[in-house]
Image: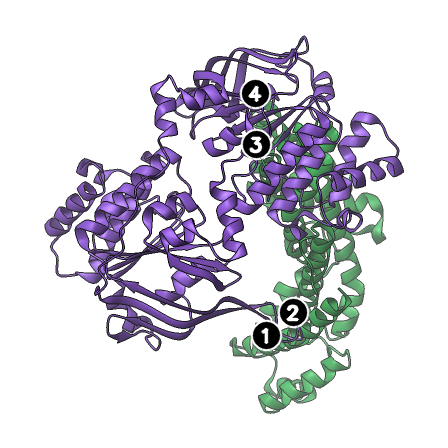
Chain colours: A purple, B green
């Protein structure tokens, strides 16, 4: 039921004053939102999609400034006084954010935080606001809402916190809900639940939704109209169906084609087994101590057996807390564990740190976070050759340098970059550096712990291709840990599905994707690759 | 919570034991004794005195006896102020030091917190720069400069305050010492507060509060401030222990009969019992204030739970 235009952004520019001078994040864009419709603003990191909406809500960081106009029902939000603005924010236009874990105040109860905007905007009494808060928690389907009113944010899961955020945003029956990547930080199954809830609430309450996202899958299933942004400009706009069917701009076409493609063939049947774990168990102690009683035991990995052959990629999938990263670390003996672990013909179960050291070069690990895992005070050359100092101390510095050049070429970076520092590189380039750091040692097994999760889709695709090429060139075996099923599917020939430390289901990739047997796997698959729409187009 | 406090009090016992033991032997390792004075006592008198205070006993016996007395709340006689027991000295001096210290602490927390908030809300503007300048000055000018300047200006030039002395606790005598004690603390608290408030104002839940259209008052006071005071609470614990046990500089310059001077005087004179008494008092204050800080922490931050 698209109606009149209620929000229109005209020639909006957002500039930030930084140490490197003024940076223009949004460069004169136009967009509009009609009553009751769902508009998606799509783009990769740095496209200015979030800053556009932050500017509209006067939420820019203190070094930012916006010019142009953001008209909401005849008022320019950019020039409105503070108290006038606060009659619109949270009342007529509200917003939910990407980080459900930190977007609620940790020091107040859910009830207190829910009641505050209700009382502020509608002037209800305490008791009436409380009843209203209870109704909202029911609306967003939080179980046991009466008790939850007294809970603190840290007592709730990410999905529940996002529901609370939605309840707060909808508390005063707004015209427009701006949702800034509201499901990016959540597991796929939770993501589907939240999107279903948003669609249902929109049907019930009739507000317009502005959806800021990098995820075209969500846009396809959710939006009426789409704006595609790049480098602070809108490069294409149109009805969702038309835009997906017939993209005009090269960038849109590139985004649409950015899903990682291709499949990995399984290794030869007689390929030797490289890394084998039998009944691997990892327990963590929680609490305990002087007069506090015995600690609680949490079994993060529960009797898991796994066999990794040469040139094989085993994908380990599962939601956060399923124990998939812990398993990867235990197999590399980076965590103490029970059970047997064999590498080639060596038994690692009893190996101590000194025994492990010579084996480390053959067992490498690449982390998720390309920003935190590279030392900011070392040059790229120093970072990638550091392992050589330990494992091949006889190399001269000239030889090390040659190896660095070779490794950087392999991962598709120019060798001249080796004298620069990590902060000068983008996320995708940093991940290439992290991969080069592992590859320079010529390893046999590489554990890849969510190596593409922090990257944009188009960059993900490149990294997936790079990893597959390196595998083919060097006979590598991968343990690929990820919650992203599209990437796992493109990378692995065998898949293990984990939940609460246990294997739920395992098998060759096409079997798991084609015909999942277990209910949990089916839920996971449905949430990730289903293409049915959450809502009918207006 | 009750169990937690009980547990903490129990762990305080071994902590105290270690502190007392270390201090007991360390001060005896230092060369000389309580009766090696400049002018020198005649050997007979010295021997008599040492016999009277049990200083000729084997050191382990002295240690056991000291612990026994301590458990009965008896700190023993002062060797250098022979008319007083250590307990009497503290009974007279401690209330004075605590009064001055506590007032200085309260003043520092009140003024420092407000200055810090003002600076944070005006980040990189005039208000911020003035607070930073003030705070830098406050923490770099030593108390032995501040104290005489206060005496000179307020005491001699303008004749508003007495130059020194306790005056039986007249309030006008307390102003100079309290100001001197609190100025550096104001500076530290203001800087801490500024930093943590700026960080707090940048956090995601503050963005949420703004997006919900809450008033500035609610955003700043209800949501940003409560999280931002936590570092101040942490700092205030050890600071309170230090302030309340007196300051040798302030008490000497203003001629205040507190306990601040005992620590240094007693250590220099090898007044074993008085040194030990001071160690015990400071340790008790430190343990108590750290416990109070941890309890306050749980009060301010619901994520902290001790059970």
| Residue drawn at (55%, 38%) of the image | A183
For mark 2, give the secondary structure: helix
State left or right for residue A357 relative to residue B56.
Answer: left
**Disc 4 is attached to a residue of which chain?**
A
Mark 3, residues whose alpha carbon is within 10 Å: few (<14), some, or many (≥20)?
few
From this viewpoint, which residue is outermost toward the front? Answer: A515
The percent coordinates of residue A148 (x first, y second) are 75, 49
In depth, the one of B51 and B212 nearer the eye is B212
What is the C-alpha distance between the residues marked 1 and 4?
Answer: 62 Å
**Disc 3 is attached to a residue of which chain?**
B
For mark 1, give the secondary structure: helix
Does the CB distance between marks 1 and 2 fall below 8 Å? Answer: yes
| Residue drawn at (63%, 74%) of the image | A290
What is the C-alpha distance between the residues marked 1 and 2?
Answer: 7 Å
**Disc 2 is attached to a residue of which chain?**
B
Can the viewer see residue B176? no
Q: Residue A327 carries which label?
A: none
State left or right for residue B154 relative to residue A231.
Answer: right
Q: What residue is pinned by disc 2?
A: B279
Q: Which of marks 3 and 4 is in front?
A: 4
Q: What residue is pinned by disc 3?
A: B133
Q: What residue is pinned by disc 4?
A: A55
**Considering only order in the chain, which callout, 2 or 1, is on the residue closer to the N terminus?**
1
| Residue drawn at (53%, 31%) of the image | A221
Q: Which of marks 1 and 4 is in front?
A: 4
């Amino acid at each position: 039921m698209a109606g009149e235009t209620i929000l229109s952004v005209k020639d909006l520019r957002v500039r930030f004053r930084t140490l490197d001078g003024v940076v223009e994040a949004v460069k004169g864009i136009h967009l509009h939102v009609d009553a009751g419709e769902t508009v998606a603003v799509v783009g990769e990191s740095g496209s200015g999609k979030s800053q556009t909406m932050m500017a509209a809500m006067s939420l820019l960081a203190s070094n930012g400034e916006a010019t142009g106009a953001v008209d909401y029902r005849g008022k320019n939000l950019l020039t409105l006084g503070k108290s006038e603005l606060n009659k619109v924010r949270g009342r007529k236009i509200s917003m939910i954010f990407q980080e459900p874990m930190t977007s609620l105040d940790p020091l107040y109860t859910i009830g207190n935080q829910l009641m505050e905007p209700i009382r502020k905007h509608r002037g209800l009494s305490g008791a009436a606001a409380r009843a209203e808060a209870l109704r909202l928690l029911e609306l967003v389907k939080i179980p046991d809402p009466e008790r939850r009113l007294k809970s603190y944010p840290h007592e709730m899961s990410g999905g529940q916190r996002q529901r609370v955020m939605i309840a707060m945003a909808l508390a005063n029956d707004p015209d427009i809900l701006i949702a800034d990547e509201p499901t990016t930080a959540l597991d796929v199954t939770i993501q589907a639940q939240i999107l279903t809830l948003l669609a249902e609430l929109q049907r019930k309450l009739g507000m317009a939704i502005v959806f800021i996202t990098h995820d075209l899958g969500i846009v396809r299933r959710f939006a009426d109209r789409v704006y595609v942004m790049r480098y602070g400009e809108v490069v294409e706009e149109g009805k969702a169906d038309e835009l997906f069917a017939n993209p005009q701009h090269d960038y849109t076409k590139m985004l649409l084609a950015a899903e990682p493609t291709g499949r990995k063939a399984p290794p030869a049947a007689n390929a030797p087994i490289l890394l084998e774990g039998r009944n691997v168990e990892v327990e963590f102690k929680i609490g305990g101590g002087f007069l506090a009683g015995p600690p609680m035991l949490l079994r993060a990995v529960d009797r898991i057996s796994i066999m990794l052959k040469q040139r094989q990629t085993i994908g380990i999938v599962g939601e956060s807390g399923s124990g998939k990263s812990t398993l990867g670390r235990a197999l590399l003996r980076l965590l103490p564990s029970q059970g047997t672990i064999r590498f080639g013909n060596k038994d690692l179960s009893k190996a101590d740190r000194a025994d492990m050291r010579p084996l480390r070069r053959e067992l490498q690990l690449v982390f998720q976070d390309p920003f935190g895992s590279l030392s900011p005070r070392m040059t790229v050359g120093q970072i990638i050759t550091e392992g050589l100092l330990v494992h091949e101390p006889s190399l001269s510095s000239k030889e090390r340098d040659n190896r660095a050049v070779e490794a950087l070429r392999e991962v598709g970076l120019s060798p001249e970059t080796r004298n620069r520092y990590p902060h000068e590189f983008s996320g995708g380039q940093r991940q290439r550096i992290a991969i080069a750091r592992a590859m320079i040692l010529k390893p046999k097994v590489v554990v890849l712990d969510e190596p593409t999760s922090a990257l944009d889709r188009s960059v993900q695709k490149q990294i997936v291709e790079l990893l597959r090429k390196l595998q083919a060139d060097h006979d590598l075996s991968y343990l690929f840990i990820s919650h992203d099923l599209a990437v796992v599917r493109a990378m692995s020939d065998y898949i293990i599905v984990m939940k609460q430390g246990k294997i739920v289901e395992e098998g060759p990739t096409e079997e798991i994707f084609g015909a999942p047997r277990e209910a949990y796997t089916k839920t996971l698959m449905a949430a990730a690759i289903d293409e049915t729409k959450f809502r009918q187009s207006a | 919570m009750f169990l937690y406090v009980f547990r903490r009090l129990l762990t305080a016992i071994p902590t105290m034991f270690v502190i007392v033991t270390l201090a007991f032997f360390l001060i005896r390792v230092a060369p000389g004794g309580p009766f090696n004075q400049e002018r020198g006592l005649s050997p007979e008198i010295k021997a008599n005195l040492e016999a009277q205070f049990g200083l000729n006993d084997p050191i382990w016996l002295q240690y056991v006896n000291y612990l026994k007395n301590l458990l009965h709340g008896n700190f023993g006689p002062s060797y250098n102020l022979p008319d007083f027991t250590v307990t009497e000295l503290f009974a007279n001096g401690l209330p004075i030091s605590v009064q001055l210290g506590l007032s200085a602490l309260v003043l520092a927390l009140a003024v420092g917190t407000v200055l810090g908030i003002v600076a944070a809300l005006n980040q990189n503007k005039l208000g911020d720069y003035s607070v930073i300048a003030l705070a830098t000055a406050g923490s770099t000018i030593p108390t032995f400069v501040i104290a005489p300047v206060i005496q000179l200006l307020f005491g001699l030039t303008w004749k508003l305050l007495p130059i020194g002395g306790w005056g039986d606790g007249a309030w006008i005598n307390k102003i100079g010492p309290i100001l001197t004690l609190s100025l550096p603390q104001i500076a530290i608290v203001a800087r801490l507060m500024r930093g943590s408030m700026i960080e707090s104002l940048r956090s995601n839940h503050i963005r949420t509060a703004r997006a919900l259209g809450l008033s500035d008052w609610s955003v700043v006071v209800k949501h940003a401030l409560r999280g931002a005071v936590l570092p101040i609470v942490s700092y205030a614990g050890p600071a309170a222990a230090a302030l309340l046990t007196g300051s040798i500089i302030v008490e000497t310059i203003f001629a205040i009969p507190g306990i601040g001077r005992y620590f240094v005087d007693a250590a220099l004179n090898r007044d074993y019992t008085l040194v030990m008494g001071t160690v015990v008092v400071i340790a008790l204050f430190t343990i108590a204030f750290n416990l109070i800080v941890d309890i306050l922490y749980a009060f301010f931050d619901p994520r902290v739970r001790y059970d």
